[in-house]
Amino acid sequence: MIVTRPQHDVITKYLSVWAEEVINFAKEKGIEVFDLIKEKANKKDFCGRVKKLQPDMIFLNGHGDDDCVTGHDDQEIVKAGDNHNILYGAITYALSCNSGKILGQKVTENKMTTYIGYEDKFIFVSDRNYMRCPIDDPKARPFMEASNQVMISLLKGNKAKDASERSKSKFRDNYIRLLSSSADQDSLQAAQCLWWNMRNQVCLGDLDAELKV
Amino acid sequence: MAGYKNTKKILSDENVRKLVMARLSVLSKDTMISLGSEGSYTREQLMESVKNGDRVGEKLAEIQLEWLRSFKEKVAV
């Protein structure tokens, strides 16, 4: 498995830190993880690693747009019409904004390829008192847990469509919990954002793909 | 969903602007909302965006309206 984890702003720091949960789980399962963190999350290193290792799974964290996902300092790592074919044959989960809209569609023109991502903004709520320790941020947890469920489920051997459904189910559970909570003044806004992410997550291409271990 | 995505300037509707502002005004002062490459925003910054009708404000309005609309469509959950 190859993971990209840029860390150049608050958002990428949160994604990166929470991705450690997935990395640790993969290692516990005996799966080799190539972790392209910070400056290593760049196009050259990413493409080089993918070509050499031909991983079954790719976990992209970072900013994105309709047609691309970026790495450290917002440099493009994968872009539709440029190097999208680097993802052919793999199951990719892109925790980034919008890339399910064009990049995901383009990549999955190859029928052996799976792309799970978001068709619009991935939005999350956080507490600025936890910026130095995002893993302890209780406001971010419902978002990151639900997102990580895609990878955890794939690593458990589930099919791509089931991994996406389990993630959506986690978003839904957290959404309902927050919607019915009166303990936190932020809960309704957070619930709406969870609903938004759940609604915009897409699983494209080979829906029956699973990790071959 | 596509209907709202293609509609520009949702916040030009004063009632919508008031609705979104009212929701944001109850957020705690330490809460941040992150909207991908747009960045992370505090309550005050979000309210300013809504007031100015910029992209962040428009996105928040879009989420709010689509969420409300989903109840009518019975697809919220």
Image (cartoon, rainbow, N blue to C red):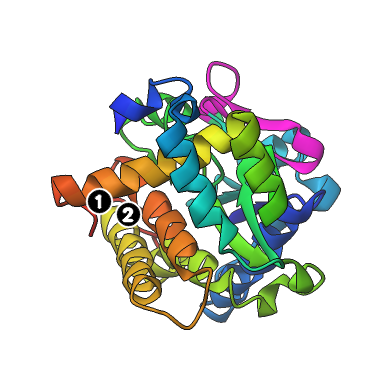
Labels 2 & 1 near each other (Cβ < 8 A): yes
Query: Was residue A79 drawn as part of the magenta stretch in this picture?
Result: yes
Dot 2 amino acid type: Ala
A19 over B34 or under it: above or below: below
Dot 1 amino acid type: Asp
**Which comes sooner in the sequence, label 2 or label 1?**
2
Relative to residue B53, is residue A129 drawn left or right?
Answer: right
- The region drawn magenta spans A66-85
Separation of residues labelled 2 and 1 (CA atoms): 6 Å
Q: Which mark is residue A187?
A: none
Name the residue rendered at 80%, 50% in the picture: A9
**Place of residue A45 in the rendered image (x, y in percent of width and height, measured from the top left):** 76, 40
Res. A201 visible in picture: no
Q: Which mark is residue A208?
A: 1
**Place of residue B75 in the rendered image (x, y in percent of width and height, measured from the top left):** 18, 51
Name the residue rendered at 16%, 47% in the picture: B72
Pick the front one: A134 or B44: B44
Dot 1 falls on a residue whose secondary structure is: loop
Pick the front one: B26 or A204: B26
- The residue at which mark 2 appears reads as A160
Quadrant for the N terminus of chain A, please. bottom right
